[in-house]
Amino acid sequence: RNLTRDNTLRSSFEKSVPPTDSLEVNSTLNEVTLVHATPEGDQAIARALLSRILGKSLNDSGIEDFIKNPENLKQLYLDTFKVMEPWDSAPREFEFASVTFEIAISAAAYAQLKRHRMATMVVGPYQPELDITVPPALRGNAGEEILRKSAEDSRHLVEKLMQEHDAIHPYAFLSCHRRRVTVKMNARELIHLSRLREDQHAQWDIREISSQMLSEARKVLPLSLIPACGKHEFESYREQLDI
């Protein structure tokens, strides 16, 4: 039923707007792109924290005056993180700010990302034109050539299956093939993501993706993501912040 619906929507779109996706491989594609963020997200979270703690309205003038002061705002976050341990979730108020990414992600990394079920994900089909993810050990040597040849063979098989058995063609893709995934995560979930996926024990592919996600998110949520790091570096990171 979903396949029928998607094909109907695709047909309707293509009648109005000709397809623009090129079949050429885009090897310069950014893996992670930040496409939206809650305006003044750090302030939104701080407002929610103070509202609960003080028992006041979110629009209380005293709260507004407090968070307008950058030093007050930063200290509020540092005080919040003082009692946080690496296994602790961030306070529920951290769900008041979110960011949305568009990610070109391999099948292998997506298998890790989709476990974060608190996030909202819209998943596209595998697309050979998004290039493949090449493991570091294979980059620039004969191993990469073999992998790319296998990916090309896989693409030909996919094209054949789409003509004869369209429903099963996704199974012909490799773990290195990519798909577009639009992901919306709040700051609470981003901190949880960093604990697991930026940890030194995480699989390298999802670790690279997560690091890019956090790097982009910190541009818009610099205070609420202060404690976002892998479990292995939590203590040293807290010492650097003197909290």
Image (cartoon, rainbow, N blue to C red):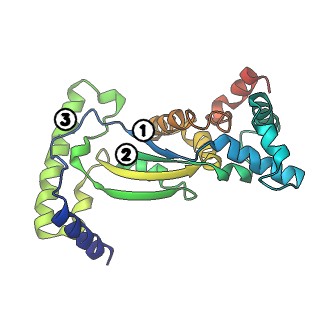
For the residue carrying disc 1, how many other residues have a C-alpha within 10 Å: few (<14), some (14-19), or many (20+)? many
Q: Is mark 2 on a helix, strand or loop?
A: strand
Looking at the image, is mark 3 or mark 2 earlier in the sequence? 2
Q: Mark 2 points at which residue?
A: 105
Three-letter amino acid code at the position of disc 2: Ile
Please give the name of the residue rendered at 69% of the width and 26% of the height, measured from the top-left corner: 237
Q: Mark 1 points at which residue?
A: 205
Which is more foreground, mark 1 or mark 3? 1
- Left/right placement of residue 100 relative to residue 139 reads right
Q: Residue 19 carries which label?
A: none
Looking at the image, is mark 2 or mark 1 earlier in the sequence? 2
Q: Is mark 3 on a helix, strand or loop?
A: helix
Q: Nearer the viewer, residue 210 or 73?
A: 73
The location of residue 243, given as percent across then percent down, is 80, 27
Looking at the image, is mark 1 or mark 3 earlier in the sequence? 3
Three-letter amino acid code at the position of disc 1: Asp
C-beta proximity under 8 Å, tags 2 and 1: no
The location of residue 37, given as percent across then percent down, is 53, 45
CA distance for labels 2 and 1: 9 Å
Which is more foreground, mark 2 or mark 1? 2
C-beta proximity under 8 Å, tags 1 and 3: no
State which quarter of the image contains the N terminus.
bottom left
- The quadrant holding residue 80 is top right
CA distance for labels 1 and 3: 19 Å
Q: What element carries label 1?
A: helix
Q: Which of 211 and 44 is in front in this view?
A: 44
Q: Nearer the viewer, residue 93 or 115?
A: 93
For the residue carrying disc 3, how many other residues have a C-alpha within 10 Å: few (<14), some (14-19), or many (20+)? few
- The quadrant holding residue 2 is bottom left
Q: Mark 3 points at which residue?
A: 146
Please give the name of the residue rendered at 20% of the width and 44% of the height, measured from the top-left corner: 151
